[in-house]
Image (cartoon, grey):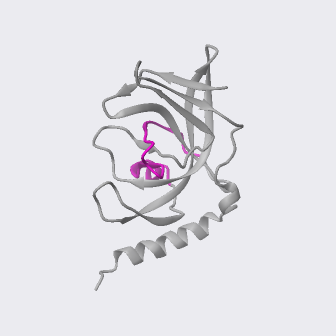
Amino acid sequence: MWEHSGRFLTAIGPLVHVRYRCVDLEAGEVEPPPVAGVMLIDTGADITGIDNAIPEAMGLVPLRFMPVAGVNNAPEDYPVYRMGIDISGVRHGERETVTFNAHVVGTPASAEGYSGLLGRDSPQHLKFIYDGRTSTYRLQLQAPVEDLMSSRNGPVDRKERRRKARKLDKRRRKPRR
């Protein structure tokens, strides 16, 4: 059982260090270097979201746009990307990394300084344990790491995604009557 234990519990909540990776590269494409970040574990969030500047800097193209409403906001369309996320932890004194691929929503940057929210949708094979008495938490890997989204959406042609993203983006920019 892999676990990430920590006292990296701040006033805003539990944080984990991550690396964001590009996935689904086509033949001949050069993989951009991974981007380091910090994610807030948000058990109240339905979805996983990251600062939209990260996938844009990696050259990722949105798969689609999705309406998302924050705590007090009306829904707005945000881009959805497929990318890899690595979370490092320690098991029996050895550093290990949990790697998974997921759909994430590109959102505006956080004022608190973290690069994303790890919501309940991703990854479904991790168990989050919080001990309020000691203000510590653990993430435990419960099952073999699998690609979370491959069974739902299958392989997608990157050129087709770009075409659809441009079409959706044009629709978003048209003035509403």
Instruction: Report the residue that reaches farthest toward the front.
Output: 133
Is residue 27 visible in the rendered structure shown here? no
Residue 43 shown in magenta: yes
Is residue 165 visible in the rendered structure shown here? yes
Vertical placement of residue 58 versus 142, above or below: below
Residue found 67% across the figure and 56% down from its top: 26
Left or right placement of residue 40 versus residue 103 in this view: left
Q: Tell me the quarter of the image containing the C terminus.
A: bottom left
| Residues shaded magenta | 31-59
Residue found 48% across the figure and 52% down from its top: 47
Left or right placement of residue 117 versus residue 156 in this view: left
Residue found 30% across the figure and 30% down from its top: 11
* Nearest the eye: 156 or 154: 154
Quarter where residue 14 is shown: top left
Please provide percent x and percent y for residue 39: 44, 38
Please provide percent x and percent y for residue 56: 44, 54
Vertical placement of residue 123 versus 172, above or below: above
Vertical placement of residue 74 versus 115, above or below: below
Residue 38 shown in magenta: yes
Please provide percent x and percent y for residue 95: 60, 20
How many numbered marks are there? 0
